[in-house]
Image (cartoon, rainbow, N blue to C red):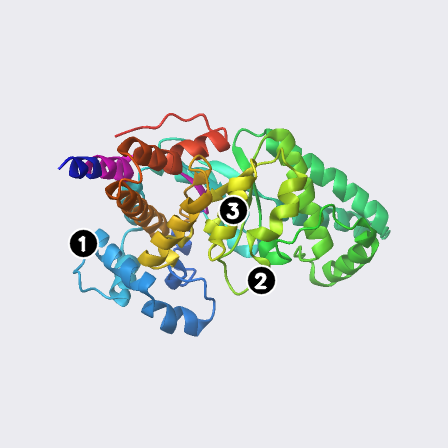
């Protein structure tokens, strides 16, 4: 009998406690609400076949379909196509509100560094304040800043008809360090993020091989002069940018998030394991590193680093709703195998569509409840311990690690 009371109390906390979403992206502006294929909600595949024919047959999609049908008030037998047509016809502000309200997110940390033309399709980070109790904070993507400043330095030399690689690099170095330091002091910035995993992989050299500068700059400047755009995808430059960010972030006490594991076909999977970050983590012991996306499928490696390095923390987002319910429970269990529960953080990885915030929240709470309930029923955890884990994972750890200074608004 008593265990049932404990389970009830645990469910009350897990499903109601406010949350801090430590990693998400902006929602699409209403005029661009259908700019991307909605299947991106449940798959990282980018091929037409993968999106339209394969993704709707995943367990993740079947579950998302049922949960969204319920949210929209549609028949439980609705299929994926009826979900899509319902949302196409829905009033956008209402759709955003009905997806965000049940999440109980008190504060969102938004990575607003999406590059290229797609940035104009997104709302500004502060637009999301209307759905939360506390102002949204920014997570600054270091590769975006580096690209902008490198293009600026190149433009100046090209305009002056005087390309000197060594000087170009010196001027870029100074600006990049200065820009990151200024951002690190900005109270609207909660931390930094690196997507080096997407570019040249997580085996970041410490320190980067500086003898490469001249070669790299000449190649980059030629490409830039021809294309008038620049993508940071040279191992020396990317590793360099990460090293600078790690140093500056440590000085300003701002965490650096790293995309690890789960991503699209752009990622070299063999270079996406957080184990490759070990030299970097060791070289900057004063800089907090947040491993994103549960590092799925390298979750155990991430838990290992989290347990042995004081400066490593583990986010267990993005698996909601991308992974099946069984996969989510297994992944969370792997997170908890080694990682101290004062070092784990939750996120939605919400992006573009408000449904990503909704599913990222309800599925994570469900998963957290089921995993903790199992331990409670087997007497491996007491009720206060299980409740403490839930509060820390949803709110308290992010609040402390990012120095947000928030008070949980318990309903
Ligand atoms: Zn993300």
In this rendering, which labeled residue sits more in front, label 3 or label 2? 3
Q: Is residue 284 left or right of residue 131?
A: right
Q: Which residue carries the number 3 mark?
A: 304
* Nearer to me, 238 or 29: 238
Marking on residue 73: 1
User: In percent of the image, x 70 and y 35: which residue is there?
Assistant: 178
Q: Are marks 3 and 2 in contact (CB under 8 Å)?
A: no
User: Mark 3 or 1 closer to N-term?
Assistant: 1
User: Residue 256's quadrant in the figure?
Assistant: top right
- Alpha carbon separation for disc pair 2 and 1: 43 Å
User: Mark 3 or 2 closer to N-term?
Assistant: 2
At label 2, counting other C-alpha atoms closer than 10 Å, the crowd grade (few under 14, some 14-19, many 20 or more) is: few
Q: Residue furthest left?
A: 1
Q: Residue furthest front?
A: 379
At label 1, counting other C-alpha atoms closer than 10 Å, the crowd grade (few under 14, some 14-19, many 20 or more) is: few
Residue 59 position (above or below residue 305): below
- Is residue 135 visible in this depiction of the protein? no
- Residue 222 location (% of width, % of height): 78, 61
Q: What element does badge 1 sit on? A: loop
- Residue 382 location (% of width, % of height): 28, 34
Q: Which residue carries the number 2 mark?
A: 270
User: Mark 2 or 1 closer to N-term?
Assistant: 1
* Nearer to me, 6 or 97: 6
Q: What element does badge 2 sit on? A: helix
Q: Is residue 266 left or right of residue 283?
A: left
The residue range painted magenta reads: 8-25
């Amino acid at each position: 009998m008593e265990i049932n009371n404990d389970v009830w109390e645990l469910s009350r906390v897990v499903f109601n406690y406010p949350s801090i979403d430590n990693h998400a992206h902006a929602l699409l502006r209403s005029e661009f609400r259908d700019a991307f294929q909605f299947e991106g909600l449940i798959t990282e595949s980018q091929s037409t076949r993968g999106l339209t024919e394969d993704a709707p047959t995943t367990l993740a999609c079947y579950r998302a379909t049922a949960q969204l049908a319920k949210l929209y008030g549609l028949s439980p037998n609705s299929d994926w196509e009826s979900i899509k047509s319902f949302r196409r016809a829905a009033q956008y502000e209402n759709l955003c509100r009905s997806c965000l309200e049940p999440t109980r997110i008190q504060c969102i940390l938004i990575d607003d560094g999406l590059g290229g033309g797609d940035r104009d399709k997104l709302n500004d980070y502060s637009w999301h304040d209307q759905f939360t109790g506390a102002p949204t904070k920014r997570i600054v993507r270091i590769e975006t800043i580096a690209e902008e400043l490198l293009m600026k330095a190149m433009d100046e030399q090209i305009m002056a008809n005087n390309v000197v690689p060594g000087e170009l690099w010196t001027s870029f170095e100074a600006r990049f360090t200065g820009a990151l330091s200024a951002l690190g002091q900005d109270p609207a910035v909660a931390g930094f993020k690196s997507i080096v995993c997407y570019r040249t992989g997580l085996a970041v050299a410490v320190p980067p091989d500086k003898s490469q500068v001249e070669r790299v700059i000449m190649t980059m400047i030629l490409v830039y002069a021809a294309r008038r755009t620049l993508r940071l995808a040279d191992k020396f430059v990317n590793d360099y940018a990460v090293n600078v960010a790690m140093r500056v972030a440590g000085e300003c006490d701002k965490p650096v998030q790293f995309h690890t594991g789960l991503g699209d076909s752009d990622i070299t999977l063999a270079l996406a394991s957080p184990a490759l970050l070990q030299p970097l983590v060791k070289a900057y012991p004063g800089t907090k590193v947040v491993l994103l996306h549960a590092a799925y499928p390298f979750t155990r490696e991430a838990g290992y680093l989290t347990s042995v390095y004081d400066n490593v923390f583990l986010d267990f987002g993005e698996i909601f709703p991308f992974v099946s319910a069984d996969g989510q429970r297994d992944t969370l269990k792997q997170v908890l195998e080694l990682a101290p529960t004062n070092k784990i953080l939750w996120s939605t990885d919400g992006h573009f569509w408000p449904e990503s915030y909704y599913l990222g929240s309800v599925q994570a709470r469900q998963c957290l409840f089921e995993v903790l309930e199992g331990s409670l029923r087997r007497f491996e955890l007491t009720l206060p311990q299980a409740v403490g884990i839930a509060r820390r994972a949803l709110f308290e750890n992010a609040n402390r690690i990012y120095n947000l200074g928030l008070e949980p608004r318990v309903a």
